[in-house]
Amino acid sequence: MFSKILIANRGEIACRIIKTAQAMNIATVAVYSEADRNALHVQMADESVFIGPSASSESYLVGDNIVQAALETGAEAIHPGYGFLSENADFCRLCAANNLIFIGPPVEAVEAMGSKSAAKTIMAEAGVPLVPGYHGADQSPDLIKQAANDMGYPVLLKAAAGGGGKGMRAVYAEDEFDQALEAAKREARNSFNDDIMLVEKYLLTPRHVEIQVFCDAHGNALHLFERDCSVQRRHQKVIEEAPAPGMSETLRQQMGEAAIKAALAINYQGAGTVEFLLDTQGQFYFMEMNARLQVEHPVTEMISGQDLVEWQLRVACGQPLPCSQNQLKINGHAFEARIYAEDPDCDFLPATGQLTVLQPPAENAYVRVDTGVIEGDEVSMYYDPMIAKLIVWDIDRDRALQRLIQALSEYRIAGLTNNIGFLYNLATTAAFKAGEVNTGFIAQHEQEIFRQRSLDIAYAIPIAAEAMASLREQQALDSANHSSEPNSPWHLKNSWGLPNVQLQLQIQGQRAVFPLNRSRRSTSSTVVSTDLGFDLFTENGYFRCCEVKPNLGENVEDGMNSLKAPMNGTLVALTVEIGSPVLKGDTLLVMEAMKMEHAILAPADGQVLDFFFQPGELVDGGTELLAFEVNENELP
Ligand code: ADP
C-alpha cells in the first residue's frame, strides 16, 4: 500500500479522501489556493502545499504545480477527487512521466470517455444501447439542425466535452434551434475551451439511473448496484438514492451487465459510473461514463457497507478487488441531499457569503455529513457552491426518508441563501414519498415544492404566529441570560401569555396580518431564526417568514430586480438593439456567473434605452445593467 498520497482537490471530497487514507495509515498531502489557506482539507491533511491564486485555472487546474508538490513532498500517488483534473488525460500522462500513480483509470480509458461523442461511438460498437441522436464529427450547424429536425422535437444539445450541465440546451421547436445552438456552443467554449456539440432525442420523463462499476488490473470487474439520481435542477442532481425505487432484480442485473460491458470495452480500472436514462417502459440507454469517483458515491457505500475510496487505493496499487460480485448485497436504503449555497426561488442562482451559522445534524449510524467547510468559512465565487452532502441510511426507503426529513429540519445554516427549505419541501411531497421520481420531478411538483398556494399560507399563519411569540420570548430570555446562541432552533412547546399586538409577516413572500397571540395548538414544527425573520419546518413543508417592519415597507423580499445583475459575473452578450421593440420575456442580455449563463429578460413590452456595460465587462451583483422603457399602452 502507498505510504503517502497527494489529494489534488479541495472541499468535501478532499476531506472525504483524507479520512479513508488516515484509517489506512496513509499520510496525506493537501494542496490549496489563496482562498483555501485555512480550509478544512488543509487542516486535516498531514502536510499541505500552496499551489497558487484562488481562481482554479491558476491553482487546482495547474497540473505542473500539483505534480511538483507531489514530488517535493515524496507522495507516491495522486488522488484527483472529482471535477478539476480527475478526467484530464494530459494530467494522467504528466503523472506517469513523473513516476506518480494516478488514482483512477488508465489514461486510454480517461481519453475514451473524455468526449461524450467518442464515448457513444465506442459504446455503440460494444452493443450498449444509446439514446438516439447525432454525435458525428461534422459540426456544420445545418447538419446538426437537420439531425434534430429528422429526430423530431424536443431535442437536447450537449457539449461533447461537457460536464456539470454546462453547454446543454433543450430545444422544443425548430425556430429556437439556431439561437440555442449558439448559446450552448458559447457556454461550452467558455467552460471547456471546446464547442463540439452532439444532439440527442430529449426524453421527457426518464429516470437517471447509474451503475457503480469497479475493475482491477487483474481482469476482475463487478458492479455495486444502482443509484437513482433523477431528481435534478438545471440537469444536475440534488437528491440521489440507492437502490432505485421500484427497481426489479431482472432490470438491475441487465443494467449491471451493460455497465460492466461498457467498462470492459475500454479496459477500465478503478471506480467508474455508467450513467443511463431509463424510460417508462423499462428501456435503458447509455448516456455517458464518468471515469472517476462520483459526488453521490456515499449512498452506494451506505447500502453496500464498502468504502469506495479504500477500493480505489487498493486497485491503484495493484491489489485485486476486495470481493466478488456474489459477495455484495444491498442492505437497506440510502439518500443523499446536496446542500448548496443557492437560491431555489431565483432559478437556483449560486450564492456567496459567510457561513455565520453552520450546525449540521449530529452524525451517527444513520446520518452522515460530508463537508469541507466549518462555521465562519466563506463560500466564495471561485468554486462549486456545495456546502455539504447529507447522507442518511435506514433499513427501508420509508424509514430512510423519515431520517432525511428529520435531518434536514435540524440543519442550521445562516448567513447565506441555501436550499435546505427547498430540499425539505421536495422530500416531503407525496410523490417523492411514493418514489415516483423522474428527471422532470421538480417542474412537475413545482406548486407543492415552492409552496405558492394561498392555502399553505393559511396553514402557516397560526404556526408562524406561535413561532413569532416564541421568538420574542426567546429573545427576551437570551438577552436576559446573555446567550451567545442567537440562531439556535427550538421546538414549539411552551405557551405563556403575551399582549395582543397586530403582527405583520411575509410568509413565502405573501403578506399576512394577524394578532400576536398563542393559539395553544400542538405542533411538531421547528423554528430557526434567520437574518430577516425565521424559518419554519412543519409537517407540511418549509416556510420562510420575515417580519414586515414599517420602515421596510412592502419590499422586504424584493431581492431580485430583473434588470439588475443577479450576482457578480461577466456580461456575455447583448441580444437586442437599443431602441428596437421587444416583447415581455424576450432575452435582453446574457451574463455568465460561475460558468453558467443567466438571461436578463424584458419585464414588459417596450424597448431598451441604453446598455450600461459591454460584453466582456465584469459586473457586481445588484448593479443596474440597462435602462428600459415600458410601452405606454402597457402602463396602468
Ligand atoms: P453532464 O455531464 O453535463 O452532467 P449528462 O450527459 O450527464 O450531462 O446529463 C445530465 C442530465 O441531463 C441527465 O442526468 C439527465 O437528467 C438529463 N439528460 C441528459 N440527456 C438527456 C436526454 N437525452 N433526454 C432527457 N434528459 C437527458
Image (cartoon, rainbow, N blue to C red):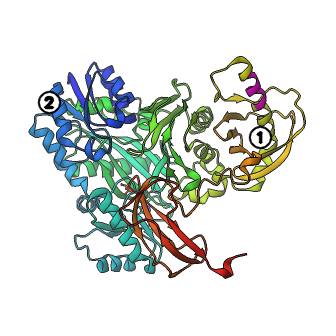
- Image quarter of the N terminus: top left
Q: Is residue 415 above or below residue 21?
A: below
Question: In the image, residue 581 lies at what x, y percent?
Answer: 53, 82
Q: Is residue 97 visible?
A: yes
Please tell me how crowded label 2 is: few (under 14), some (14-19), or many (20+) other residues with Cα within 10 Å.
some
Q: Secondary structure at mark 2?
A: helix
Q: Which segment did they paint magenta?
A: 472-478
Residue at x 52% of width, y 74% of height: 586
Spot occupied by residue 551 in the image (x, y as percentages of width and height): 74, 48
Q: Specify whether residue 553 is painted magenta.
A: no
Label annotation for residue 314: none
Out of 504 and 256, give the one closest to the viewer: 504
- Which of 598/5 is in front? 598
- At label 1, the amino acid type is Ala
Please name whichever residue, 398 or 253, is drawn nearer the observer in this view of the structure. 398
Quickly name the residue at label 1: 464
Whether residue 365 is situated above or below residue 449 in the rendered picture:
above
Q: Residue at x 24, y 39 (%)?
A: 104
x%, y% of residue 585?
56, 72
Q: Is residue 318 visible?
A: no
Q: Main secondary structure of the magenta part?
A: helix
Q: Amino acid at mark 2?
A: Leu
- Residue 396 lies in quadrant: top right
Q: CA distance from mark 2 to mark 1?
A: 59 Å
Element type at mark 1: helix
Looking at the image, residue 436 sits to the left or right of residue 546; the answer is: left
Write down the quadrant of residue 486 in the picture. top right
Q: Which residue is mark 2?
A: 71
Relative to 29, is 183 on the left or the right?
Answer: right
Q: Which comes sooner in the sequence, label 2 or label 1?
A: 2
